[in-house]
Image (cartoon, helix red, strand yellow):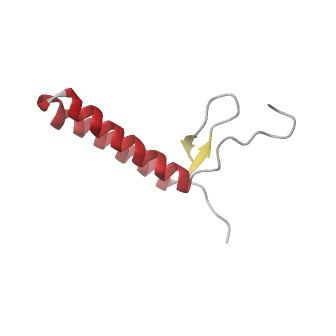
Amino acid sequence: MTQKYWFAAKPPGTGWGWGQPLTWQGRLVYIAFFILLIGGGVVLMPHGAHYFVAYTFVLAVILMLIGSRKGEPPGRFPTGER
C-alpha cells in the first residue's frame, strides 16, 4: 500500500515544514484551521487577547501534528544540494 501524503514538504531553502495541500483532506484541514482561527477571534477577542493567543497556539500545534503525520517528510535535500 502506498502512502498518499496530504501536504507537500517545503522545497529546500524555503524553511522547514509543509506547504501546499496535495489532497482534498489537506485542503479540508487548512479550511477548518482558518475557520476555527477566525471564529476563535470573534468569540475570544472581546474577553482578552491572551485567550486568543493561547487558542491560536493550540490550533497551530494541532496543525503541525497533522502535518507531521500526514505530510511528506520535511527537510530532505536532493543529492548534491545543501
Q: Residue at x 47, y 52 (%)?
A: 66
Label tally: 0
Q: Residue furthest left?
A: 47
Asked whether, in this view, residue 72 is left or right of residue 55, the answer is right
Q: Nearer the viewer, residue 55 or 8?
A: 55
Q: Is residue 52 left or right of residue 6?
A: left
- Residue in front for this viewpoint, 39 or 77: 77
Residue 27 image point, x, y percent: 46, 48
Residue furthest out toward the right? 80
Q: Look at 57% across and 41% down and name the residue there.
A: 18
Residue toward you, 58 or 13: 58
Q: Above or below — where is 80 with respect to 71?
A: above
To which quarter of the image does residue 46 belong? Answer: top left
Residue furthest bottom in the image: 1
Which corner quadrant holds the C terminus?
top right
At which x and y percent is residue 79? 85, 40
Residue at image point 54% right, 56% down: 69
Q: Quadrant of residue 53?
A: top left
Question: Which residue is located at x 32 percent, y 37 percent?
Answer: 56
Give left or right: position of 8 versus 66: right
Q: Can you give x and y, in whole percent of width and height, for residue 9 in the image?
A: 63, 43
Residue 3 figure quarter: bottom right
Work out which quarter of the rendered image holds the N terminus and state it. Answer: bottom right
